[in-house]
Structure formats: C-alpha cells, structure tokens
Image: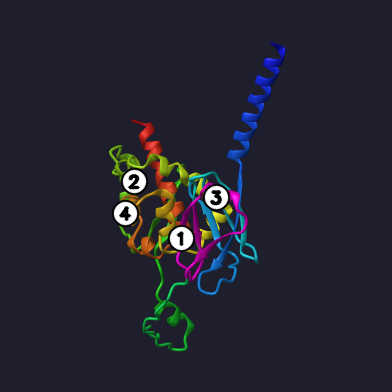
Amino acid sequence: MKYFLSVLFTFISLLGFSQETEENQRLSAVVINAQTEEPLESVHVVNLNQVFGTITNEKGEFSIAAVVNDTLYFSFLGFKSQKIRVTNDMFKFENTEIALTELAYALEEVIVRPYQLTGYLEIDVKNLPINNAYQYSISGLGVSYEGGNKNPSAVTKVLGAILNPADLLRNLFGKKPAQMRKLRQMREDDEIRNLLASKFDRETLTEFLQLEKVDIQDILNNCNYSKSFITTANDLQILDAISSCYEEYKVLNRKK
C-alpha cells in the first residue's frame, strides 16, 4: 500500500511539473527578410493572448513565453505585419524562421505652402499655424480630456458625459469587456508601448482589442476627442485616450 501511495504521489508530482513546464515554455525563433533571407533586428514580437512583447536581436533572434495556440504578432517598419499561431512543432524544432515581406511604398506628390515672412519676429510668430488641440484635466478627476479651438464645445460635452449616467460609451465598451481588460496590461508593457508609439495606423490596436477601426473612432468621438486628435495621434496616445475613457465608463457604471 505504501509503495502504491508513493508511486501515486510521484506521478501527481511529475504531472504537475509537466503542466507547469508546459505553461511556461519559451519559444525561440529567428525573423528574416523574405526577399533577402537576411536577419531582421529590432522587430517587435508581441504575444496577443498574454499581452507582452519583446524585440529581435542583431541576429534576428527572439525568445518569448508562449503556449500552443497563442498568436504572435510581428511588426517592423517597412514590412508587412504578420500574425502566426504557435504550434507544437515550433517548440520541438530549433531555428524556426519567420519571414516578413517588405512593403512597396509609393511617394506621393507633396505640396509645400511657404509662409511669407516679414522679418519681424512678433508678426511672423502670430502668422504661424498653431495646433490648438490640447489635453486638459478637471480637478478631482483621474482622467484628462482634449479640447481647444478645434473642439470648441469640448468642456460642455465633457461635463455632460460626466453627469449623464446614460453615457453612450457603455454600448461600445460593454460589447468587448474582455478586450477592454487588456488595456491596463498593454499600458504596463514597455515593448508594447514602444511599438504603439511608433505606429499611426491603428492596426496593432485592432489586433489586441479585437475591435474595428470604426469602433475605435466611435469610442474617441463619444469621449469628446476632436477629429484633429483622432487623425493625428499615434497609437500609444490613442491607447491612453481609450484607457482614460474606459476608466470613466467604469466609474459611471458603478454609480448605477
């Protein structure tokens, strides 16, 4: 009987160890240029399921924690972004190669409209265009808002949103609560923040949050951000704006 119990406990221990090992596997691979087969350095590699990332070294190598069926997202300037589903074979075989394809960029005609300078600094400064879209905070609130001449009714809209419990945001955030929970994790990972700071196409955000670009725009519109901010902000600024708006939504929801 003692022998049986000993074998049983050993089996359970080994089973627990194997499960722990499986949960904490690290996937190592190499990212290369599909055309030249040269390794690519500083490619952003993000685990969309577990919400953390890394970058490739000078040899194109990377190592990241993952489990089977996780989705890895690869992004590099000048190359087409790519998603790859993690398989058992990727853990079994070393030196797995991930090939990224270069994008062909066509340079469009750029029209430069010079400003007539008078030579008098005080006059020339007044004639320069100024982006009046800026962010401001309301005392007592942990979120900030964007306003200015390009969004003249921002203050009125913000106060209305704060005081109105039937805020339209719940219709958007309520549809994707699981994706919205990823916001905090995304903001805490340095590699993800660095990736988003370099992008303006909302592509990475749509992959993470499983939202369409039009949904992101609707969220920002309902959060009273101006068209100027929505179209010119980088993806990290958009992430912070959505996150602030989501925190406000949760506060409003709790008060019901």
Q: Which mark is residue 159?
A: 2
Let me know if residue 119 appears in the view.
yes
Of the two numbered discs 2 and 3 on the same chain, state the one appearing first in sequence: 3
Residue toward you, 256 or 214? 214
Q: Amino acid at mark 1?
A: Gln
> Depth-wise, is mark 3 or mark 4 nearer the camera?
3
Measure the C-alpha gap from mark 2 to mark 3.
55 Å
SS state under label 2: helix
Indicate whether 122 appears above or below 148: below
Residue 28 lies in the magenta-colored region? no
Measure the C-alpha gap from mark 3 to mark 4.
45 Å
Of the two numbered discs 1 and 2 on the same chain, state the one appearing first in sequence: 1
Q: Residue at x 44, y 82 (%)?
A: 124
Residue toward you, 153 or 15? 15
Q: Amino acid at mark 2?
A: Leu
SS state under label 4: helix
Measure the C-alpha gap from mark 4 to mark 2.
15 Å
Residue named by callout 1: 82
Q: Are marks 2 and 3 in contact (CB under 8 Å)?
A: no
User: Tag 2: Cα neighbours inside 10 Å, few (<14), some, or many (≥20)?
Assistant: few
Of the two numbered discs 1 and 3 on the same chain, state the one appearing first in sequence: 1
Q: Which residues are magenta?
A: 72-101
Let me know if residue 145 appears in the view.
no
Residue named by callout 3: 89
Question: Residue 55, position in %: x, y?
Answer: 59, 59
Residue named by callout 4: 221
> Which quadrant holds the C terminus?
top left
Measure the C-alpha gap from mark 1 to mark 2.
42 Å
Q: Are marks 1 and 2 in contact (CB under 8 Å)?
A: no
> Which quadrant holds the N terminus?
top right
